Amino acid sequence: MKMKRYTAPEMRQALKMVRDEQGADAVILASRRVDGRVEITVAVDDDALDGITVAPLSDVPAATTAAFNQGAAGGSFESLLAARGAAPVATSSAGDSVNGELKTLRRMLETQLAALAWNDLTRRAPLATELLREMSEIGFTADIAGQIADALPTSLDFTGARRLAIARLADRLQVTGDRWCEHGGVVALVGSAGVGKSAAVARLAARWVMRHGAQDLVLVCADAQRPGAHEQTARLGRLLGSATFRVDDLAELPALLDRLSSRRLVLIDTAGVGLRDAGFEPLMTGLRAVRARLEIALALSAASQAGTLAETAARFAPLQPNACVLTRLDECASLGGALSVLMRVKLPVSYISEGPGIPDDLRPGRALDLVCLAVQLAERNGAVADEDLLARRFGGSFNVAS
């Protein structure tokens, strides 16, 4: 395979140089901007291209320019080839090999077009791209960051745009305020094992006692799986001076709630199980049977990866959680991903938990405080968004055919 680089002030001139010297069979492997000039790397391999019809390079500039003018977004590899007048790929005895090479070329073309589109966007909209860069560093997902950047007025300077972006992000994050510790309710905390659910129950209970006393508080342990769970709840009740109960089967819960109807706050600690454990479905079945009698608070660890949080929210979605308790904020290095998940599934934050203190390390979730904390974490940890990642995220999407 022969490879050669061509440089020119702009893309159209570089492609003309390739066409004049290499002809229509030249394959573009890479393209980038270097010191204000366009650099194209091309290759010609007659053996690898047997049976494949390649579009004439003379057709490339118009299609490429049009794609760049549109931000290189929303197209597909096939539509780009169609715009260049490419003929269908011919089958051959070495079909698998050719298909593999085509997929590689498609991925390379996708990457290069995304990089070019991102570079073009940085020139046309430097304010928007700088905000996209910062939101990516904070950890917000591409869809959230893109929607925020698109909606910002172009007349703002960077400081004003940054402040408005933070405010818009906060507007997307729903919160409940100090509802349960103010007004009470029947609340069951659910969540995966190890996310700090039982600690959150203890902190909520202590917060209530400090404000209202222990008379109207009831703690219910519905965790028959974790060794010592009932004893832990009973010990907490003795410390706070509140009544405690245990249920070994969620089917016992409706009768118990009937007995406790005069109490203002009933906190139910359920079993923490893994999403793929055998006990997960029985837990969900039992909770669905009593769902109409209580509110559901989903405990989520802020220290978990965004993908894990998204899966957890999806698995517990049939319970229609009323809110979430965001735990372990003191252990997380990045918060934007977790907030993106909550924004996407529209799950309000009731309380946040950080540190070992009871009840001082539990407080109501406030949207602007959480977004600002996400910004501070990114700055404190020196988060940097990779240019290739930014190009893939925001430079346009060209789907690779399977």
Image: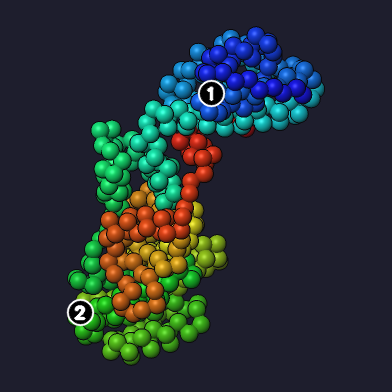
Residue 317: % across, % down: 40, 56
Residue 377: % across, % down: 40, 59
Earlier sequence position, callout 1 versus callout 2? 1
Q: Residues within 10 Å of mark 2 (few under 14, many from 20)?
A: few
Residue 155, picture quadrant = top left
Please name the amino acid that badge 2 sits on.
Arg
Please name the amino acid that badge 1 sits on.
Arg
Q: Identify which residue is drawn at 34% across, 38% down.
A: 149
The C terminus sits in image quarter = top right
Q: Mark yes or no: residue 315 visible.
A: no
Residue 316, picture quadrant = bottom left
**Front disc: 1 or 2:** 1
The residue wearing badge 2 is 211
The correct choice, above or below, for 316 with respect to 103 in the image is below
Residue furthest front as drawn: 35
Left/right placement of residue 2 relative to residue 333 reads right
The residue wearing badge 1 is 37
Residue 100: % across, % down: 71, 31
Q: Identify which residue is drawn at 63% across, 20% down.
A: 6
Spatial CA span between label 1 and label 2: 67 Å
Residue 318: % across, % down: 40, 56
Q: Identify which residue is drawn at 45% across, 82% down.
A: 229
Q: Identify which residue is drawn at 29% across, 69% down.
A: 363
Which SS class for mark 2?
Answer: helix
